[in-house]
Image (cartoon, rainbow, N blue to C red):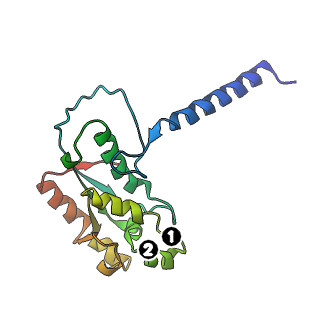
């Protein structure tokens, strides 16, 4: 026979689990990048107008799980989608992604990624969609050299920087702010 305390604990667990699952249903991808960047509609207190311009550099050094989307890269799709959904013109969003460390492997061409990890590179389409939405993607040349990644191994459109530090310094001089992850 279960005690009242145990029944209450079981009820709390089931109630909490249902609330967590219900919250996930509030997220949707799009409108700009259709299959990535899920976001929720939020009643917000920080107000911006539809003429607001964003110029932001994101930084990642952590590789995603082999064969899975790197969620840090997907954050850029989320940023674009949620702001376009809230009235910001896509043209007013300028993003850059600076990649270093083992995250550089997520930028590799599909066939080379497949050779190295025996998995498909789930980031290929996401990176293509980001670049179609004017996201500039830079790989740290120092990390690339360390991990034996060269320009020819990168997906088309991805650029090599001297270093991640250099990329951030140049982007900051061009008016980009750094988004802390």
Secondary structure state at the residue bearing disc 1: loop
The residue pinned by badge 1 equals: 120
Mark 1 or mark 2: name the one nearer the start of the chain.
2
Vertical side of 99 occupied by 110: above or below: below
Q: Position of residue 160 (x, y in %)?
A: 25, 72
Q: Position of residue 23 (x, y in %)?
A: 52, 33
Contact flag, marks 1 and 2 (Cβ < 8 Å): yes
Vertical side of 34 occupied by 139: above or below: below
| Residue 151 visible to an observer of this rendering | yes
Disc 2: CA contacts within 10 A as few (<14), some (14-19) or many (>=20): some
Q: Nearer the viewer, residue 101 or 36?
A: 36
Q: Could you give the CA–CA distance between mark 1 and mark 2, rounded to whole angstroms?
A: 7 Å
Secondary structure state at the residue bearing disc 2: helix
Residue 92 located left or right of residue 66: left
The residue pinned by badge 2 equals: 110
Residue 98 located left or right of residue 73: left
* Image quarter hosting the N terminus: top right
**Residue at horizontal 57%, vertical 30%?**
19
Q: Quadrant of residue 71?
A: bottom left
Q: Quadrant of residue 100?
A: bottom left
Q: Position of residue 51 (x, y in %)?
A: 16, 37
Q: Position of residue 124 (x, y in %)?
A: 41, 66
Vertical side of 107 occupied by 47: above or below: above
**Residue at horizontal 34%, vertical 72%?**
155
Q: Nearer the viewer, residue 81 or 47?
A: 81
């Amino acid at each position: 026979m279960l005690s009242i305390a145990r029944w209450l604990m079981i009820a709390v667990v089931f109630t909490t689990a249902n609330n967590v699952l219900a919250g996930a249903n509030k997220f949707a991808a799009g409108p700009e990048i259709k299959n990535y960047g899920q976001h929720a509609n939020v009643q917000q207190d920080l107000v911006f107008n539809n003429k607001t311009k964003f110029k932001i550099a994101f930084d990642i050094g952590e590789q995603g799980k082999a064969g899975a989307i790197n969620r840090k890269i997907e954050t850029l799709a989320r940023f674009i989608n949620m702001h376009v959904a809230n009235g910001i013109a896509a043209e007013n969003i300028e993003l850059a992604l600076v990649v270093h460390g083992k995250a550089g492997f997520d930028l590799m061409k599909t066939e080379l990624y497949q050779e190295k990890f025996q998995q498909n590179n789930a980031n290929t389409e996401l990176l293509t969609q980001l670049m179609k939405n004017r996201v500039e993607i830079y790989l740290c040349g120092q990390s690339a050299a360390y991990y034996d990644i060269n320009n020819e191994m990168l997906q088309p459109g991805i650029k090599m920087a001297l270093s991640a530090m250099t990329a951030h310094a140049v982007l900051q001089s061009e008016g980009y702010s750094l988004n802390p992850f």
